[in-house]
Amino acid sequence: MPALPPEFAAAADRTACRVAIRRGSKSFFAAGQLLPADVREAAYGLYAFCRYSDDLVDEATSPAARHAAVARLDRRIARAYAGAAADSPADRAFSEIVASCAIPEALPRALIEGLAWDAEGRRYADLDALHAYAARVAGSVGAMMALIMGVRGPEALARACDLGAAMQLTNIARDVGEDARMGRIYLPLDWMRAGGLDPDAFLADPRPSPALTAIVTRLLAEADQLYRRAEAGIAQLPPRCQPAIRAAGLIYREIGCRIAQSGHDTVTRRARVSGARKLALIAQAARARAEVAELAAPALPQALFLIEAVARHPLAPLRQRPALRPWWDVVGRVVHVLDLIERMREREAFGRSAPS
């Protein structure tokens, strides 16, 4: 079968990345609708690669298979930075994004390091150790998103890492039971032991308890503090990007509210934010005005290496964005129309059944 023309291939890759995110991360897909088109396409491409990476490790059925998956991801990152991306839409999109947005290789490699920790079943002795994990699997993504939006200042990057870490702590609080049934535990071990919970006994028979309620409450309080710190960075973003990032934060904070409403039981229940509530939060984010707040809080120490990697990375030479095509460029116009049709279908589906 002959290869597609580059324009058609690029449009097909963009569509594949959008579909992957719509299926795999409804909250991010919903918030991403508020991003301007160029940033949204890059964000979906980045998240498609990150999602693929996470799923590749999660779906491996043995320790050896998980370590092999991490090794494959490591090679794919190397190929992306060498300009020879693996043959998949997410890889091709990722390769283009890291070049055009000057994303240092240390950031996606930090993500892969965190996934390697998952593969080995690492546990976290205390909150500092858990922050080191969150910085890798989520702070790195927050920093890459900031770079996609054209923001490279250390203060704004620190707040982007705060938001990523807050979301990760929320995920951990929500998934205590699900993780335990998979043989994983992310709660700080010193918190568990102080509450009289033996980690191995809990994994063998995960149950709600007052001690676990206190731990989940404490973890959500830590996440909430990071959400408040992250708000100060939203004003540092381009105005056209602020509503989407604010919406993402609001939706994830709402998960914590749902957990609290269920009595902090995340063993027998899984907190969900309804589609209607997500739409309300997105509307709230779109109406809100940015408030300039002091960026006084220091960066999380565990995220400093990400910020320093950006400071060391050269901005030039950057890959140039393609010039606007003239009206008589028929192929380019057809691709544009196909892309618009796909977006219209997505929005129609989004309106009929809001994401859960």
Image (spheres, rainbow, N blue to C red):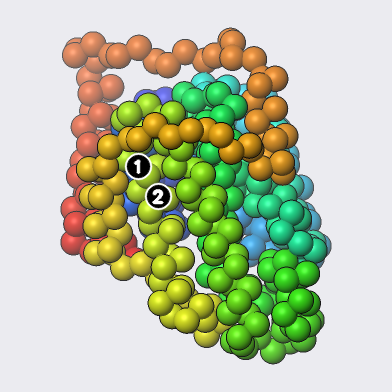
Instruction: Identify which residue is drawn at 74% across, 54% down.
Output: 128
Q: Which image quarter is the C terminus in?
A: bottom left
Q: Is residue 62 above or below residue 101?
A: below
**Quarter of the view holding residue 157:** top right
Q: 109 and 11: which one is in front?
A: 109
Q: Is residue 83 above or below residue 135?
A: above
Amino acid type, mark 2 = Ala
- Is residue 11 visible in the rendered image? The answer is no
Image coordinates for residue 70, horizontal then vertical, percent:
73, 51
Q: Is residue 53 left or right of residue 24?
A: right
Amino acid type, mark 1 = Ala
Q: How many numbered marks have been drawn onto this rendered protein structure? A: 2
Instruction: Identify which residue is drawn at 28% across, 29% down.
Output: 335
Image coordinates for residue 233, horizontal then vertical, percent:
47, 35
**Quarter of the view holding residue 143:** top right
- Labelled pair 2, 1 in contact (Cβ < 8 Å): yes
Q: Which image quarter is the N terminus in?
A: top left
- Is residue 283 visible in the rendered image? The answer is yes
Q: Secondary structure at mark 1?
A: helix
Instruction: Identify which residue is drawn at 23% across, 50% down.
Output: 283
Which residue is tagged 2? 248
Instruction: Identify which residue is drawn at 61% across, 87% down.
Output: 209
Residue 332 numbered mark, or none: none
Q: CA distance from mark 2 to mark 1?
A: 6 Å
Which residue is tagged 1? 244
Image coordinates for residue 279, horizontal then vertical, percent:
25, 57
